[in-house]
Image (cartoon, helix red, strand yellow):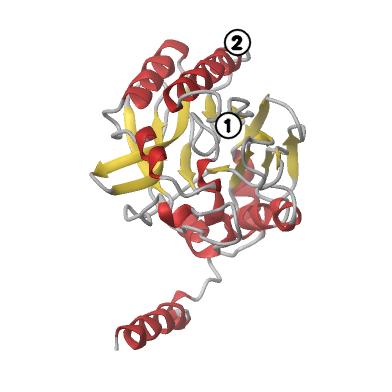
């Protein structure tokens, strides 16, 4: 019998501007919206469900203001993860929950908690690659680079890994997730129309092919005020180990995307494309040596 897993993604707009609502009010409204969508997922018998990056607010990295530190929480002890544990247990659903984590005063991470279908907290992934690029993506102001590796979580239904947004531009971590046994990699994101849109449907299917696993790519939707960094274009999707997009959401509306994934395809693809057999890790030392040399030169 095929190992079929029904998976879901939620993409959603944050329509409440900090010009008109307090940060606490925005958080409350976004969590309530997602509670409704999680309940819908349960009705559709989704077994593993992923939420978008920083799901309980707007993409506040569009500005550099310390007020947004107010949204940080402990993981797993904070109120949002605790609530999601209750929902996971109630609906018997695995949840990938991206939040703004505080480890200690002044040390914050862009984090995703993974909760099993019985409500147990399995662990977290902290975003490794932190952008600070063109206006509107000032993430180094808010986040410390991830320091917890590339874990894979054995859930009731599948072994899942997490990559977060900008991470998707870096193949190294995607490979490690595959080596660590990931069958499905969730990538919660916040990306706007422009240069990234072409890459949105290129890079992650390439990770799926190179590593022979499924990818679940999530993007938020809409324009968030008062900022003018562009439109979050949705188009969340699932792709299979051959890199084919097998289900895709709309561009411009809140949506729960559901797809049935046959995990047996992973073995079939790996029997055909022997990328893990033919790897040459002993020849890749230049990747780390070059970085070490740059770091040493900068220090001197």
Position of residue 270 measured from the top left corner of the image (x, y, whole percent):
60, 55
Q: Earlier in the sequence, mark 2 or mark 1?
A: 1
Q: Quadrant of the N terminus?
A: top right
Q: Position of residue 48 (x, y in %)?
A: 52, 28
Answer left or right for 259 relative to 158. Answer: right
User: In the displayed structure, does residue 230 sit left or right of residue 168?
Assistant: right
Residue 198 location, quadrant = bottom right
Note whether 98 is above or below 64 in the view shown. above
- In the figure, 255 relative to 105: above or below? above
Tag 2 residue = 43
Q: CA distance from mark 2 to mark 1?
A: 21 Å
Q: Is residue 74 above or below residue 191?
A: above
Q: Secondary structure at mark 2?
A: helix
Give how far across and how far down residue 186 sits, in percent: 54, 41
In the picture provided, is 165 more to the left or to the right than 128? right
For the C terminus, the image quarter is bottom left
Q: Hey, which quadrant is residue 190 in on the image?
A: top right
Between 263 and 93, the residue placed more toward the observer is 93
The disc placed on residue 3 is: 1
Q: Is residue 109 visible?
A: yes
| Identity of the residue drawn at 74% across and 38% down | 246
The residue located at (77%, 35%) in the rendering is 251
């Amino acid at each position: 019998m095929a190992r079929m897993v029904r998976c879901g993604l939620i993409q959603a707009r944050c329509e409440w501007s900090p010009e008109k609502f307090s940060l606490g009010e925005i958080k409350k409204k976004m969590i309530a919206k997602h509670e409704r969508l999680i309940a819908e997922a349960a009705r559709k018998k989704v077994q593993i469900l992923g939420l978008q990056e920083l799901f309980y607010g707007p993409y506040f990295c569009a500005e550099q203001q310390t007020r947004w530190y107010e949204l940080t929480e402990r993981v797993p002890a904070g109120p949002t993860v605790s609530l999601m544990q209750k929902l996971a247990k109630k609906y018997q659903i695995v949840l990938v929950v991206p939040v703004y984590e505080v480890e200690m005063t002044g040390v914050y991470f862009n984090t995703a908690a993974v909760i099993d279908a019985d409500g147990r907290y399995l662990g977290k992934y902290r975003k490794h690659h932190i952008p600070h690029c063109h206006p509107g993506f000032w993430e180094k102001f808010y986040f410390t680079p991830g320091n917890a590796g590339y874990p894979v979580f054995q859930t009731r239904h599948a072994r899942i890994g997490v990559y977060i947004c900008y991470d998707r531009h870096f193949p190294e971590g995607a490979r490690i997730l595959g080596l660590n046994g990931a069958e499905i990699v969730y990538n919660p994101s916040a990306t706007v129309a422009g240069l990234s849109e072409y890459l949105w449907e290129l890079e992650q299917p390439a990770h799926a092919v190179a590593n022979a696993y499924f990818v679940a790519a999530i993007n938020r939707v809409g324009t968030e005020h008062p900022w003018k960094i562009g439109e979050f274009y949705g188009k969340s999707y699932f792709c299979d180990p051959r890199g084919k997009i097998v289900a895709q959401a709309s561009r411009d509306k809140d949506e729960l995307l559901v797809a049935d994934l046959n995990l047996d395809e992973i073995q079939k693809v790996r029997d055909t494309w022997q990328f893990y057999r033919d790897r040459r890790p002993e020849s890749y030392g230049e990747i780390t040596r070059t970085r070490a040399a740059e770091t040493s030169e900068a220090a001197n």
